[in-house]
Image (cartoon, coloured by chain):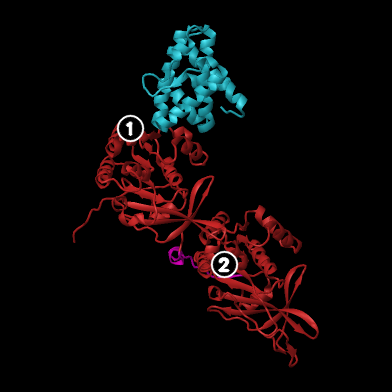
Chain colours: A red, B cyan
Amino acid sequence: MIERKRVEIRKLPTGVPGLDLVLGGGVPEYSFNLIAGEPGTGKTTLVHQFVFENARPGCTAIFFTILGEPAIKMLRYQQQYGFFDPKKVGTSVRFVNLTDDVVERGLDGVLERIVAEVGESEAKIVVVDSFRSLVGTVGGGDSAPPDLHQFLQRLAIHLTSWEVTSFLIGEYEEADRRSNAVFTIADSIVWLSQVPDNNSVVRKIHVVKVRGQGSMPGLHTFRITDDGVQIFPRLSPAVEEQERETRSGRASTGVRELDEMMGGGIPSGDSVLLAGPSGSGKSVLATQFIAEGGKRGEPGVLVVFEEHPKEYLARAEALGFPLLRMIQEGLLEALYLRPLDLSPDETLYEIRQAVDRVGARRVVIDSISGFELALAPTFRADFRESLYRLVGALTGVGITVLTTMEIMQDSSELRFTPNVVSFLADVLVMLRYYEAEGGIGRAIMVAKMRGSQHSKAYREYEITNRGVELGGDLDGYSGRISGAPHLSRDPR
Amino acid sequence: MSYPEPTAHGIAARELSARLFVHLAGESPVPASTAAAVESVCQRLRAELTATLGSGGASALLVRALHLATREHPLLAGVTVGNDPHECLTALSEAISGRSDQEAAAAGAAIFTHLFILLVTFLGEDLGLQPLFKFWPHLARGVEEIEG
């Protein structure tokens, strides 16, 4: 067998959270890259992050500006971002304007200037912004100049042979991808876009190609904050499975009788769907589940979509569940996510960050309908998939997840899962009202537990000032599913 | 170093400009020395700014600085920003010849005062004053003294 000694391509960190993962480890050193997209999508910001992450004495960067956004404006605005280090400017990062070169001498003049500047400074990172403006100016409009292909070949070969990692930034549209030489020559193409949808705008990034390494396929959402571009990789449960952690044992719900109905509690690492109509005590049970974790030294994350955590925590305190103390002791983090333009991956990112911060073993998502509403409309169409990935990513690392869901209940029918999301749940617990003997009561049942025996009983419960407390079995009643049970025999 | 408001901003820029002139032309320059000093500073800064901002960007800032300086010193009315790399400000010598030493020096310094204010306004102190401190690094220490 012949032993092959492959060239090892170093991957440079991008400085853009999430992007290294999407690219398959980072930007290949000495590669010739295209960052493309429509105006305002964050191309320049993303490349600036790379530049400031990597530039240092001995690895200097030159940022060539050509027409497009005036350099004075670019510098003015880019320095607002947290990653922009003015101390590097003029030393490790140089900004060079090529407008005069392109206007006076065309592509040859630009190439000569880039070659001269790179040779003189021995820069290891080169950016040309905007490459589209360069081509447009030389070509006299949108048409590419006849010598563009040759120019690109010479530029790419020169920069690579000088051990430069380079980026061309350009305002391109989808149609350009079929005919433009730069798309053929580039080693990697990263495409940024922003899509308006029902009063929200979702930014997406797509790694069209990266030579020599496996990138993460698909579109990933991103956000531009004061710290620059932040990408939320679209992790599939399959990816999460690689780090799957199996936990044994049971997680107590905080309600002894409910634990008994489940055969000792929720199997650790399972997902529980707690479904019931409004006012049935879903949030109270969720609070008890988190508080019980605190008692047992199992940190938790509480994700609240519908009301502010302050109110949520105050109600917990009133019931005697010390969630505030848990927060102070680092056993709990309460997240409030309600922007209405979230992506599922951004939600997951926020939750995972909180999980990592407190070392959570339990997560409560209250509620699914609130989560659905918080998503940008474009993601609501794939809500089930989003939920599947969210829950799968958490249970995949051994976290016990309890989600609440409001369901409609009418007098003749009990619809277990109106959104057909029960397939996500390893454990399905149903709460409901029933009418008997002129009064309204509440009943709870464990409808499903994957791979585990559980009680089939319907039990009464009350919401007291100590939380949910279970009562007797409605065993003697018929017509329980209808909501109007009647006593058919003496209860046990 | 910080410029919390335009007043402090202007004071520091004015002081910086004055120190630059003293450094280049002495305490009491005659108009001819002032013209030579202004032209020399203008050429160096324009070249440096052109490298980063392009000739259009650099010229736009100089034209604006000259315009603001002319409002304070009307004797600069005939001066323009030229395209010749060897003559940054045209007709400057003619404009200030025959004026008092102080008048000429104040007008010349005003051009750079406004240029420094514009640079700090648009690019911030770190980036905006970089071209100046590249040629005259001792002035950076001067700014710290001004700022206290």
Q: How many marks?
A: 2
Evaluate if marks 1 and 2 touch, with contact meaning CB atoms under 8 Å apart: no
Mark 2 is surrounded, within 10 Å at the Cα level, by few (under 14), some (14 to 19) or many (20 or more) other residues, namely many
A241 is within the stretch colored magenta: yes
Name the residue at the front extreme: B78
Query: Is disc 1 placed on a helix, strand or loop?
Result: helix
Please tell me whether residue B93 is drawn above or below residue A88 in the rendered image. Answer: above
Residue B115: tell me if it is visible: no
Q: Quadrant of the N terminus of chain A?
A: bottom left
Where is mark 1, residue-wise? Answer: A121
For badge 2, the amino acid type reads Thr
Magenta region: A236-251
Query: Is disc 2 placed on a helix, strand or loop?
Result: strand
- Return the x and y of residue A22 as percentages of the image width and height: 41, 56
A254 is within the stretch colored magenta: no
User: Residue shown at 70%/67% (left/top)?
Assistant: A284
Where is mark 2, residue-wise? Answer: A400
Q: Nearer the viewer, residue B87 or B117?
A: B87
